[in-house]
Image (cartoon, rainbow, N blue to C red):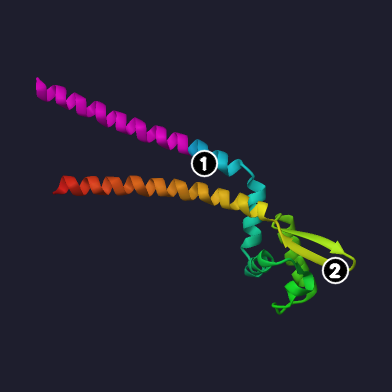
Amino acid sequence: MNFIHYTNLLKIIKYKIHLTKWLNYFVLSIIFNHMVEQNNDNLNNIFQALADPTRREIVRLIASNDRTVSELAAPFDMSLAAISKHIKVLERAGLLEKTVEGRTHICRLNPHSLSAATEWLRFYERFWNRQFDVFERELNKAKKEEH
């Protein structure tokens, strides 16, 4: 009689574990979908702008100091028109703000747009850290059971 009761108890525990895993998956998928939909176009523009090495270097240059378009063009082997196209992409993504003083165009970094991308990345960093923590606990549990 105790064996049957124990077997039923194991079935209930397995069912609860399965249900808990399913609920975790369901909740995480809702959070994931919310994050995907939130600021999707803005994030796409930011990551698309940062995908190019020239634009990443421009962001690095203006992170330390405001620069004119000519100053930004100096390190690159390209025309002012080509640099201006890169600047427009960064500007549309919200990564860069451009002001005009007379005939001089001054570019400065917009840190708020970078913080949106950083926040998005941190969500996934926390998500994967939790997943790795669960994996590590399961591995440790398996090692203890093995010995």
Where is mark 1, residue-wise? 32
Quadrant (top left, top right, bottom left, bottom right) of the N terminus: top left
Say whether residue 121 is magenta.
no
Horizontal side, residue 108 vs residue 50: left or right: right
**What is the secondary structure assignment of the residue under circle 2?**
strand
Q: Which residue is mark 2?
A: 104
> From this viewpoint, which residue is outermost toward the right?
102
Q: Is residue 117 left or right of residue 9?
A: right
Where does the image place residue 101, in percent across and percent down from the top left? 87, 64
Q: Is residue 34 above or below residue 102?
A: above
**Front in this rendered view, residue 91 or 29:** 91
Q: Earlier in the sequence, mark 1 or mark 2?
A: 1
- Judged from the image, the secondary structure of the residue bearing numbered disc 1 is helix
* Residue under the point 53% across and 51% down: 121
Q: How many marks?
A: 2
Three-letter code, disc 1:
Phe
Q: Magenta segment, principal secondary structure? A: helix
Inspect the magenta stretch and tell me whether residue 19 lies in it. yes
Q: Which residues are magenta?
A: 1-28
Nearer to us: label 1 or label 2 = 2
Residue 136, image x, y percentages: 31, 49
Q: Residue at x 16, y 27 (%)?
A: 7
